[in-house]
Amino acid sequence: MSLRNQAAIAGIGLTEFSKNSGVSELSLAAQCITAACDDAGISPSEIDGLVSYTLDSTDEIEVARAVGAGDLSFFSRINYGGGAAVGTILQAVMAVATGQASTVVCWRAMNGRSGQRMGQGVSGNIISSDLIHWSWYMAYGMLTPGSWIALIANKYMDTYGVTREDLGRVAISQRNYALNNPRAFGYGKPLTMEDYLGSKMIADPLCLYDFCQETDGGCAILITSAERAKDLRQKPAVIRGVTQASTQGQEQMTSYYRSELLSLPEMEMAARRVYDMAGLGPDDIDAACLYDAFTS
Amino acid sequence: MDATRIKPPLGHDNAWWWEMAADGKLGIQRCARCEVLRHPPRPMCGECRSLEWDTVEASGKGTICSFTVLRHPQFPGYQYPLIIVLVDLEEGTRLTSQLMDCEPEDVRFDMPVTMKIHEDPDGFKLPVFVPAEGAQ
Protein backbone atom coordinates (compact mmCIF):
# COMPACT_ATOMS: atom_id res chain seq x y z
CA MET A 1 0.00 0.00 0.00
CA SER A 2 1.12 3.54 -0.61
CA LEU A 3 1.45 5.83 2.37
CA ARG A 4 0.67 8.87 0.23
CA ASN A 5 -1.98 11.13 1.78
CA GLN A 6 -2.86 8.58 4.48
CA ALA A 7 -1.84 10.65 7.48
CA ALA A 8 -1.40 14.27 8.44
CA ILE A 9 0.39 16.46 10.92
CA ALA A 10 -2.37 17.88 13.10
CA GLY A 11 -0.33 19.64 15.76
CA ILE A 12 3.15 20.85 16.59
CA GLY A 13 4.47 21.63 20.05
CA LEU A 14 7.68 23.30 21.12
CA THR A 15 9.22 24.17 24.45
CA GLU A 16 11.36 27.22 25.00
CA PHE A 17 14.86 26.75 23.53
CA SER A 18 17.66 27.73 25.89
CA LYS A 19 21.17 27.00 27.10
CA ASN A 20 19.92 25.79 30.47
CA SER A 21 16.33 24.68 30.71
CA GLY A 22 16.49 24.14 34.47
CA VAL A 23 14.14 21.18 34.12
CA SER A 24 14.50 17.48 33.32
CA GLU A 25 14.36 16.03 29.84
CA LEU A 26 11.17 14.23 30.91
CA SER A 27 9.66 17.60 31.74
CA LEU A 28 10.66 19.00 28.33
CA ALA A 29 9.12 15.94 26.66
CA ALA A 30 5.88 16.32 28.58
CA GLN A 31 5.71 20.03 27.79
CA CYS A 32 6.23 19.70 24.04
CA ILE A 33 3.86 16.74 23.74
CA THR A 34 1.02 18.48 25.54
CA ALA A 35 1.71 21.60 23.45
CA ALA A 36 1.31 19.53 20.28
CA CYS A 37 -1.98 18.15 21.60
CA ASP A 38 -3.21 21.64 22.45
CA ASP A 39 -2.23 22.82 18.98
CA ALA A 40 -4.33 20.04 17.44
CA GLY A 41 -7.21 20.42 19.91
CA ILE A 42 -6.81 16.85 21.14
CA SER A 43 -6.59 15.67 24.75
CA PRO A 44 -3.31 13.93 25.65
CA SER A 45 -5.52 11.08 26.92
CA GLU A 46 -6.20 10.25 23.26
CA ILE A 47 -2.54 9.50 22.51
CA ASP A 48 -2.14 5.81 21.70
CA GLY A 49 1.24 5.88 19.96
CA LEU A 50 4.65 7.40 20.75
CA VAL A 51 7.85 7.53 18.69
CA SER A 52 11.23 9.00 19.49
CA TYR A 53 14.97 8.67 18.88
CA THR A 54 17.05 5.91 20.45
CA LEU A 55 19.20 8.82 21.66
CA ASP A 56 16.34 10.24 23.71
CA SER A 57 16.78 9.54 27.42
CA THR A 58 13.09 9.36 28.29
CA ASP A 59 11.10 6.13 28.11
CA GLU A 60 7.75 6.14 26.34
CA ILE A 61 5.94 4.82 29.38
CA GLU A 62 7.40 7.58 31.56
CA VAL A 63 6.21 10.14 29.03
CA ALA A 64 2.79 8.46 28.86
CA ARG A 65 2.37 8.63 32.65
CA ALA A 66 3.59 12.23 32.78
CA VAL A 67 1.11 13.54 30.20
CA GLY A 68 -1.77 11.23 31.13
CA ALA A 69 -1.77 9.46 27.76
CA GLY A 70 -4.25 6.71 26.98
CA ASP A 71 -3.38 3.04 26.57
CA LEU A 72 -0.53 2.69 24.07
CA SER A 73 -0.83 0.27 21.15
CA PHE A 74 2.30 1.44 19.32
CA PHE A 75 5.74 2.71 20.32
CA SER A 76 9.08 2.60 18.57
CA ARG A 77 12.48 4.24 18.31
CA ILE A 78 14.77 5.30 15.50
CA ASN A 79 18.57 5.26 15.68
CA TYR A 80 21.29 7.58 14.29
CA GLY A 81 20.91 10.89 16.07
CA GLY A 82 19.48 13.83 14.15
CA GLY A 83 18.97 11.67 11.10
CA ALA A 84 16.17 9.95 12.99
CA ALA A 85 13.83 12.92 12.69
CA VAL A 86 11.99 11.97 9.50
CA GLY A 87 12.21 8.29 10.43
CA THR A 88 9.99 8.92 13.45
CA ILE A 89 7.38 10.46 11.15
CA LEU A 90 7.52 7.42 8.86
CA GLN A 91 6.84 5.22 11.90
CA ALA A 92 3.83 7.30 12.87
CA VAL A 93 2.44 7.40 9.32
CA MET A 94 2.76 3.61 9.00
CA ALA A 95 1.09 3.09 12.37
CA VAL A 96 -1.84 5.33 11.44
CA ALA A 97 -2.19 3.94 7.89
CA THR A 98 -2.23 0.34 9.12
CA GLY A 99 -4.54 0.95 12.06
CA GLN A 100 -1.98 0.15 14.74
CA ALA A 101 -2.65 3.50 16.39
CA SER A 102 -4.84 6.52 15.73
CA THR A 103 -3.06 9.35 17.49
CA VAL A 104 0.73 9.15 17.41
CA VAL A 105 3.13 11.73 18.80
CA CYS A 106 6.75 11.92 17.66
CA TRP A 107 8.93 13.75 20.13
CA ARG A 108 12.54 14.60 20.91
CA ALA A 109 13.51 16.46 24.07
CA MET A 110 17.03 17.08 25.28
CA ASN A 111 19.16 19.19 27.54
CA GLY A 112 21.64 19.41 24.68
CA ARG A 113 23.71 22.12 26.34
CA SER A 114 23.19 21.83 30.09
CA GLY A 115 22.98 18.03 30.15
CA GLN A 116 25.12 15.44 28.39
CA ARG A 117 26.80 17.19 25.48
CA MET A 118 27.90 15.62 22.24
CA GLY A 119 31.38 14.18 22.23
CA GLN A 120 31.81 13.12 25.82
CA GLY A 121 33.13 9.78 24.72
CA VAL A 122 32.45 6.21 25.72
CA SER A 123 33.94 4.37 28.61
CA GLY A 124 33.49 1.32 30.75
CA ASN A 125 33.59 -2.33 29.88
CA ILE A 126 30.39 -2.62 27.88
CA ILE A 127 31.06 -4.13 24.46
CA SER A 128 28.63 -3.62 21.60
CA SER A 129 29.07 -3.22 17.87
CA ASP A 130 28.10 0.43 18.26
CA LEU A 131 30.78 1.10 20.89
CA ILE A 132 33.37 -0.74 18.83
CA HIS A 133 32.40 1.45 15.87
CA TRP A 134 33.03 4.64 17.85
CA SER A 135 36.22 3.29 19.41
CA TRP A 136 38.09 3.35 16.08
CA TYR A 137 37.79 7.12 16.29
CA MET A 138 37.77 7.83 20.01
CA ALA A 139 41.07 6.10 20.68
CA TYR A 140 42.63 8.63 18.31
CA GLY A 141 40.86 11.64 19.83
CA MET A 142 37.99 11.96 17.39
CA LEU A 143 35.33 12.46 20.03
CA THR A 144 32.99 15.01 18.49
CA PRO A 145 30.67 15.16 15.46
CA GLY A 146 32.81 18.00 14.12
CA SER A 147 35.93 15.84 14.17
CA TRP A 148 34.18 13.15 12.11
CA ILE A 149 32.67 15.57 9.61
CA ALA A 150 35.84 17.62 9.12
CA LEU A 151 37.68 14.81 7.29
CA ILE A 152 35.01 14.78 4.60
CA ALA A 153 34.57 18.57 4.53
CA ASN A 154 38.29 19.13 4.04
CA LYS A 155 38.48 16.69 1.14
CA TYR A 156 35.33 18.15 -0.41
CA MET A 157 36.69 21.69 -0.28
CA ASP A 158 40.00 20.62 -1.78
CA THR A 159 38.41 18.59 -4.58
CA TYR A 160 35.79 21.14 -5.62
CA GLY A 161 37.56 24.38 -4.78
CA VAL A 162 35.11 25.36 -2.05
CA THR A 163 36.38 28.28 0.04
CA ARG A 164 35.86 29.28 3.66
CA GLU A 165 33.82 32.21 2.34
CA ASP A 166 31.48 29.70 0.68
CA LEU A 167 30.86 27.97 4.01
CA GLY A 168 30.59 31.38 5.66
CA ARG A 169 27.71 32.25 3.36
CA VAL A 170 25.87 29.13 4.53
CA ALA A 171 26.41 30.09 8.18
CA ILE A 172 25.24 33.65 7.53
CA SER A 173 22.13 32.44 5.66
CA GLN A 174 21.21 30.22 8.59
CA ARG A 175 21.73 33.08 11.03
CA ASN A 176 19.58 35.32 8.85
CA TYR A 177 16.71 32.84 9.18
CA ALA A 178 17.12 32.99 12.95
CA LEU A 179 17.23 36.80 13.06
CA ASN A 180 13.46 37.16 12.93
CA ASN A 181 12.58 34.10 15.02
CA PRO A 182 12.04 34.99 18.69
CA ARG A 183 12.51 31.32 19.68
CA ALA A 184 15.97 31.11 18.09
CA PHE A 185 19.28 31.61 19.88
CA GLY A 186 20.31 33.81 16.94
CA TYR A 187 17.26 36.10 17.30
CA GLY A 188 18.42 39.63 16.66
CA LYS A 189 22.07 38.58 16.40
CA PRO A 190 23.37 39.05 12.86
CA LEU A 191 26.56 37.30 11.76
CA THR A 192 28.99 39.05 9.42
CA MET A 193 31.58 37.47 7.15
CA GLU A 194 34.21 39.22 9.27
CA ASP A 195 32.82 37.53 12.41
CA TYR A 196 32.80 34.21 10.60
CA LEU A 197 36.34 34.39 9.24
CA GLY A 198 37.66 35.73 12.55
CA SER A 199 36.22 32.97 14.70
CA LYS A 200 38.50 30.29 16.10
CA MET A 201 39.25 27.12 14.20
CA ILE A 202 37.77 24.03 15.84
CA ALA A 203 38.55 21.16 13.44
CA ASP A 204 40.21 22.43 10.26
CA PRO A 205 38.62 23.57 7.98
CA LEU A 206 35.62 24.06 10.28
CA CYS A 207 35.51 27.11 12.54
CA LEU A 208 33.15 27.99 15.38
CA TYR A 209 30.34 29.24 13.14
CA ASP A 210 30.37 26.14 10.98
CA PHE A 211 28.79 24.32 13.91
CA CYS A 212 25.16 24.35 15.02
CA GLN A 213 24.06 25.54 18.44
CA GLU A 214 23.88 23.19 21.40
CA THR A 215 20.38 23.71 22.73
CA ASP A 216 18.05 22.58 25.51
CA GLY A 217 14.50 22.05 24.33
CA GLY A 218 11.84 19.72 23.01
CA CYS A 219 9.69 19.37 19.93
CA ALA A 220 6.68 17.15 19.26
CA ILE A 221 4.54 16.44 16.19
CA LEU A 222 1.08 14.92 16.43
CA ILE A 223 0.10 12.64 13.55
CA THR A 224 -3.33 11.20 12.88
CA SER A 225 -5.31 10.10 9.85
CA ALA A 226 -5.76 12.64 7.06
CA GLU A 227 -9.52 12.13 7.36
CA ARG A 228 -9.67 12.89 11.07
CA ALA A 229 -7.23 15.77 10.81
CA LYS A 230 -9.70 17.70 8.63
CA ASP A 231 -11.95 18.30 11.64
CA LEU A 232 -9.28 19.34 14.14
CA ARG A 233 -8.19 22.78 15.26
CA GLN A 234 -5.45 23.46 12.71
CA LYS A 235 -5.42 23.17 8.96
CA PRO A 236 -3.62 19.81 8.61
CA ALA A 237 -0.39 19.23 6.74
CA VAL A 238 -1.14 16.06 4.79
CA ILE A 239 1.94 13.86 4.35
CA ARG A 240 2.40 13.04 0.66
CA GLY A 241 5.80 11.46 0.91
CA VAL A 242 8.06 10.16 3.68
CA THR A 243 10.92 7.70 3.67
CA GLN A 244 14.12 6.49 5.28
CA ALA A 245 17.33 5.63 3.45
CA SER A 246 20.62 3.89 4.14
CA THR A 247 22.91 2.75 1.34
CA GLN A 248 25.67 0.18 1.05
CA GLY A 249 28.75 0.76 3.12
CA GLN A 250 27.26 3.58 5.20
CA GLU A 251 28.67 4.13 8.68
CA GLN A 252 27.24 6.35 11.36
CA MET A 253 28.96 9.73 10.74
CA THR A 254 32.08 8.06 9.35
CA SER A 255 31.35 6.74 5.85
CA TYR A 256 35.06 6.89 5.07
CA TYR A 257 35.49 3.50 3.47
CA ARG A 258 33.47 3.75 0.27
CA SER A 259 35.31 4.51 -2.95
CA GLU A 260 33.34 7.75 -3.26
CA LEU A 261 34.00 9.79 -0.14
CA LEU A 262 32.35 13.03 -1.19
CA SER A 263 28.72 12.17 -1.80
CA LEU A 264 25.97 10.89 0.44
CA PRO A 265 24.04 8.41 -1.71
CA GLU A 266 21.55 8.10 1.15
CA MET A 267 20.36 11.60 0.28
CA GLU A 268 19.81 10.73 -3.37
CA MET A 269 17.94 7.57 -2.41
CA ALA A 270 15.71 9.43 0.06
CA ALA A 271 14.95 12.18 -2.46
CA ARG A 272 14.11 9.73 -5.24
CA ARG A 273 11.78 7.73 -3.02
CA VAL A 274 10.00 10.69 -1.50
CA TYR A 275 9.45 12.42 -4.84
CA ASP A 276 8.12 9.18 -6.33
CA MET A 277 5.75 8.69 -3.43
CA ALA A 278 4.52 12.28 -3.52
CA GLY A 279 4.22 12.52 -7.30
CA LEU A 280 6.16 15.77 -7.09
CA GLY A 281 9.59 16.93 -8.22
CA PRO A 282 12.12 19.51 -7.12
CA ASP A 283 10.46 22.18 -9.28
CA ASP A 284 7.26 21.84 -7.25
CA ILE A 285 8.95 22.70 -3.95
CA ASP A 286 8.99 26.32 -2.82
CA ALA A 287 9.84 25.93 0.86
CA ALA A 288 12.32 23.56 2.47
CA CYS A 289 13.52 22.91 6.00
CA LEU A 290 16.80 21.01 5.82
CA TYR A 291 18.59 19.36 8.72
CA ASP A 292 22.35 19.69 9.02
CA ALA A 293 24.40 20.43 12.10
CA PHE A 294 27.25 21.85 9.97
CA THR A 295 27.69 24.27 7.08
CA SER A 296 29.57 21.63 5.13
CA MET B 1 48.90 9.48 36.83
CA ASP B 2 47.90 11.87 34.06
CA ALA B 3 44.69 11.30 32.14
CA THR B 4 44.98 8.81 29.31
CA ARG B 5 43.28 8.43 25.96
CA ILE B 6 39.94 6.61 25.74
CA LYS B 7 40.69 2.93 25.34
CA PRO B 8 38.71 0.80 22.89
CA PRO B 9 36.38 -1.83 24.31
CA LEU B 10 37.90 -5.15 23.29
CA GLY B 11 35.43 -7.65 21.85
CA HIS B 12 35.42 -10.65 19.52
CA ASP B 13 35.40 -8.44 16.43
CA ASN B 14 38.18 -5.97 17.21
CA ALA B 15 40.46 -7.16 20.03
CA TRP B 16 42.85 -8.89 17.59
CA TRP B 17 43.59 -5.59 15.81
CA TRP B 18 44.68 -3.92 19.05
CA GLU B 19 46.67 -7.01 20.05
CA MET B 20 48.54 -6.80 16.74
CA ALA B 21 49.18 -3.10 17.44
CA ALA B 22 50.52 -3.97 20.89
CA ASP B 23 52.79 -6.43 19.07
CA GLY B 24 54.06 -3.63 16.80
CA LYS B 25 51.99 -4.45 13.72
CA LEU B 26 49.25 -2.80 11.67
CA GLY B 27 46.75 -5.52 10.85
CA ILE B 28 44.20 -5.82 8.07
CA GLN B 29 41.41 -8.37 8.18
CA ARG B 30 41.17 -10.72 5.17
CA CYS B 31 38.33 -13.02 4.20
CA ALA B 32 39.68 -16.57 4.31
CA ARG B 33 37.45 -17.64 1.42
CA CYS B 34 37.46 -14.79 -1.13
CA GLU B 35 40.52 -12.95 0.25
CA VAL B 36 38.87 -9.51 0.19
CA LEU B 37 40.53 -7.16 2.69
CA ARG B 38 38.30 -5.18 5.00
CA HIS B 39 38.55 -2.40 7.57
CA PRO B 40 37.10 -1.68 10.06
CA PRO B 41 36.86 -5.38 10.95
CA ARG B 42 33.56 -7.23 10.71
CA PRO B 43 32.66 -10.80 11.75
CA MET B 44 31.31 -11.67 8.28
CA CYS B 45 32.53 -10.99 4.75
CA GLY B 46 30.02 -8.71 3.02
CA GLU B 47 31.08 -10.10 -0.37
CA CYS B 48 30.80 -13.88 0.15
CA ARG B 49 29.26 -14.11 3.69
CA SER B 50 32.07 -16.26 5.00
CA LEU B 51 32.63 -16.17 8.76
CA GLU B 52 36.21 -17.36 8.29
CA TRP B 53 38.95 -14.75 8.23
CA ASP B 54 42.61 -14.27 8.88
CA THR B 55 44.85 -11.23 8.92
CA VAL B 56 47.66 -9.72 6.93
CA GLU B 57 50.28 -7.37 8.26
CA ALA B 58 50.20 -4.07 6.38
CA SER B 59 53.44 -2.69 4.97
CA GLY B 60 52.65 0.56 6.76
CA LYS B 61 52.96 2.60 3.57
CA GLY B 62 50.11 4.82 2.53
CA THR B 63 48.99 8.25 1.39
CA ILE B 64 46.81 10.86 3.04
CA CYS B 65 43.28 10.72 1.61
CA SER B 66 42.06 13.49 3.92
CA PHE B 67 42.97 15.16 7.19
CA THR B 68 41.82 17.59 9.86
CA VAL B 69 43.54 19.42 12.68
CA LEU B 70 41.62 19.19 15.95
CA ARG B 71 42.08 22.27 18.13
CA HIS B 72 38.96 22.48 20.33
CA PRO B 73 37.55 21.10 22.53
CA GLN B 74 40.66 19.66 24.17
CA PHE B 75 40.12 16.40 26.03
CA PRO B 76 42.49 15.02 28.67
CA GLY B 77 44.78 12.30 27.36
CA TYR B 78 45.38 13.83 23.89
CA GLN B 79 47.95 16.34 22.60
CA TYR B 80 46.72 19.41 20.67
CA PRO B 81 46.73 20.54 17.96
CA LEU B 82 45.93 16.96 16.99
CA ILE B 83 46.34 15.99 13.33
CA ILE B 84 43.87 13.30 12.29
CA VAL B 85 44.44 11.56 8.97
CA LEU B 86 42.45 9.25 6.75
CA VAL B 87 45.08 7.04 5.15
CA ASP B 88 44.82 4.98 1.96
CA LEU B 89 47.07 1.99 2.62
CA GLU B 90 48.94 0.53 -0.33
CA GLU B 91 47.06 -2.73 0.29
CA GLY B 92 43.84 -0.89 -0.65
CA THR B 93 42.05 -0.39 2.65
CA ARG B 94 41.57 2.92 4.42
CA LEU B 95 41.83 3.81 8.10
CA THR B 96 41.74 6.80 10.40
CA SER B 97 44.80 7.54 12.50
CA GLN B 98 46.96 10.32 13.85
CA LEU B 99 49.85 12.06 12.06
CA MET B 100 52.89 12.72 14.23
CA ASP B 101 56.25 14.42 13.64
CA CYS B 102 54.59 16.97 11.36
CA GLU B 103 53.44 20.58 11.84
CA PRO B 104 49.73 21.22 11.14
CA GLU B 105 50.59 23.65 8.31
CA ASP B 106 52.74 21.05 6.56
CA VAL B 107 50.06 18.37 6.06
CA ARG B 108 49.05 17.84 2.42
CA PHE B 109 46.52 15.74 0.56
CA ASP B 110 48.17 12.71 -1.07
CA MET B 111 51.25 13.07 1.14
CA PRO B 112 53.06 9.72 1.48
CA VAL B 113 53.10 8.50 5.08
CA THR B 114 54.54 5.61 7.02
CA MET B 115 53.09 3.79 10.01
CA LYS B 116 54.84 3.66 13.31
CA ILE B 117 53.68 2.27 16.63
CA HIS B 118 53.21 4.95 19.25
CA GLU B 119 53.37 4.08 22.93
CA ASP B 120 51.56 6.21 25.52
CA PRO B 121 53.10 6.81 28.97
CA ASP B 122 50.71 4.17 30.36
CA GLY B 123 52.05 1.58 27.91
CA PHE B 124 49.08 1.58 25.52
CA LYS B 125 50.22 1.15 21.91
CA LEU B 126 48.49 2.25 18.73
CA PRO B 127 49.43 2.63 15.06
CA VAL B 128 50.05 6.24 14.01
CA PHE B 129 51.61 7.72 10.89
CA VAL B 130 54.56 10.01 10.17
CA PRO B 131 55.52 11.72 6.90
CA ALA B 132 57.40 9.29 4.64
CA GLU B 133 61.06 10.06 4.08
CA GLY B 134 61.36 12.97 1.66
CA ALA B 135 57.63 13.73 1.79
CA GLN B 136 57.97 17.22 3.28
Image: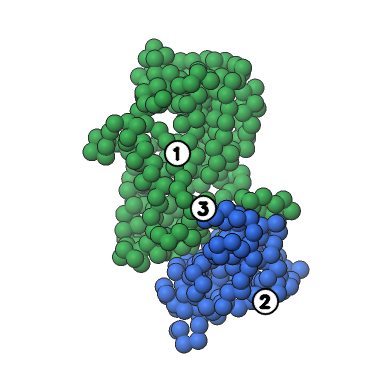
Chain colours: A green, B blue
Mark 1 to mark 2 CA distance (whole Å): 43 Å
At label 3, which amino acid type do we have?
A: Glu
Q: Position of residue A234 (x, y in %)?
A: 38, 18
Do discs 1 and 2 share a chain?
Answer: no
Q: Residue furthest bottom?
A: B134
Determine whether A270 is above or below A92 in the image: below
As drawn, A4 above or below B15: above
Q: Amino acid at mark 1?
A: Gln
Disc 3: which residue: A251
Which chain does tag 2 point to?
A: B
At 40% from the left edge and 52% from the top edge, which residue is drawn? A264
| Residue A61 image label | none
Tag 1 residue:
A244
Give the residue at the far left of this rendering: A283
> What chain does mark 1 sit on?
A
Chain letter of disc 3 in the image? A
Disc 2 is placed on an element classified as loop
Q: Quickly name the residue at label 2.
A: B24
Say whether mark 1 and mark 3 are on the same chain.
yes
